[in-house]
Amino acid sequence: MEKAKLDAGWNLDNSYARLPQTFYTSQGAIPVQSPELVIFNEALAASLGLNAEVLNSREGAAIFAGNETPEGAEPLAQAYAGHQFGNFNMLGDGRALLLGEQITPQGERMDIQLKGSGRTPYSRGGDGRAAIGPMLREYIISEAMEALGIPTTRSLAVVTTGENIIRETERPGAILTRVASSHIRVATFQYAARWGSVEELRTLADYTLERHFPHIAADENRYLNFLQEVIKRQAALIAKWQSVGFIHGVMNTDNMAISGETIDYGPCAFMDAYNPGTVFSSIDTQGRYAYGNQPYIAGWNLARFAETLLPLLHDNEEEAVQIAQDAISLFSEQHHHYWLSGHACQARIVD
């Protein structure tokens, strides 16, 4: 693919690509037939330091489809492995590519990812593509969550590809450009713990600390503090979900971001009428990810995260397990605190 020559304001870095190659595979997007912009988030583009006028165009569509690569990008597919409906699987970006990290005018580092950009080594037999309906749903709901003040990934653009894909029926293909503080997941750490060395796990942990928790990166007990910070962010996030009746639908460990942002809007929705047993995934026949179970599943996912950190928490395994259990035991109390605070705030607004 040729490098795009647009003065679009790209200011990309690639710190994730400087991690050990255990964690990713370098790969370009697979070009599509005739990309066209369906929707473009001009306000988000401006906050990222991008030139909305330049990108809201045919040339921008080519970038958001993966037909052209913005200057400074080093596209890669991230590796991860985690629990899906309680079962551990090797996963990874099967239909997504990280273009790089946009450094904003405020100095923030934001991932720019193409979702639906074609096959990768982690596709597991899939076509690596996406249909327009789910991509537009993610755009709409992620931006709604942002407006509600709930930490979330954002949506920069959706393009159609000019190609149809087969799901239950033939549907128009599309690609979403997703913006996130990072795409590091609980499942990223599960992958490192299962297939990486302890030093590679430590490298990933130190990288994540520097990126998301720099205030504790130099602490003597930084890995315990890291675990506690992730627990706190997830407790606050899930409390916000519960307060507005949001049902994620598929709370697998690969869908829990270490940053504390809501990620991966698949079969998700807001409840119309209160029912704690409400689910929004056709395959969730047991109600594992029902609205009322979300706090419990978050705690379960965090326990899986804590397990990955055991070699970093203490040299003695029994001591490490106790440290992790003590930290996880506080999740329920923290979630309840944030949930009560959220409802108290809503009550003040109503008054």
Image (cartoon, rainbow, N blue to C red):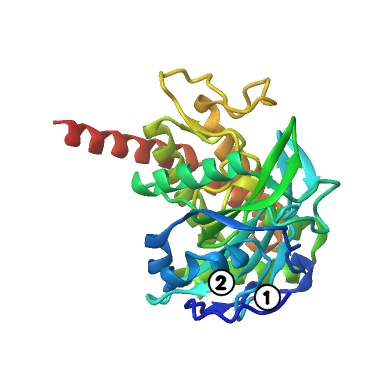
* Image side of residue 133 versus residue 334, left or right: right
Look at the image and tell me in which quarter the N terminus lies. bottom right
Look at the image and tell me in which quarter the C terminus lies. top left
Mark 2 vs 1, N-terminal side: 1
> Label 2 amino acid?
Glu
The x and y percentages for residue 186 are: 63, 52
Q: Residue 260 versus residue 44: which sits nearer the camera?
A: 44
**Gap between marks 2 and 1 measured at Cα:** 10 Å
The x and y percentages for residue 78 are: 71, 61
Q: Residues within 10 Å of mark 1 (few under 14, many from 20)?
A: many
Occupied quadrant, residue 100: bottom right
- Identify the residue at the far left of this view: 351
Q: Residue 229 versus residue 282: which sits nearer the camera?
A: 282
- Up the image or down, 253 lies above or below 202; here it is above
Which residue is at a point 58% across and 47% down the rendered structure image? 256
Secondary structure type for disc 2: strand
* Image side of residue 163 versus residue 10, left or right: right
Which residue is at a point 61% across and 46% down the rendered structure image? 255
Say which residue label 1 marks.
74
Which residue is at a point 47% across and 64% down the rendered structure image? 56
The x and y percentages for residue 176 are: 58, 53
Q: Residues within 10 Å of mark 2 (few under 14, many from 20)?
A: many
Q: Residue 198 versus residue 86: which sits nearer the camera?
A: 86
Say which residue label 2 marks.
101
Q: Residue 328 versus residue 33: which sits nearer the camera?
A: 33
Task: Report how many numbered discs are placed on residues in the image.
Answer: 2
> Label 1 amino acid?
Glu
Occupied quadrant, residue 194: bottom right
Which residue is at a point 41% across and 38% down the rendered structure image? 239
Residue 210 appears in the picture as rendered: no
Residue 223 appears in the picture as rendered: yes
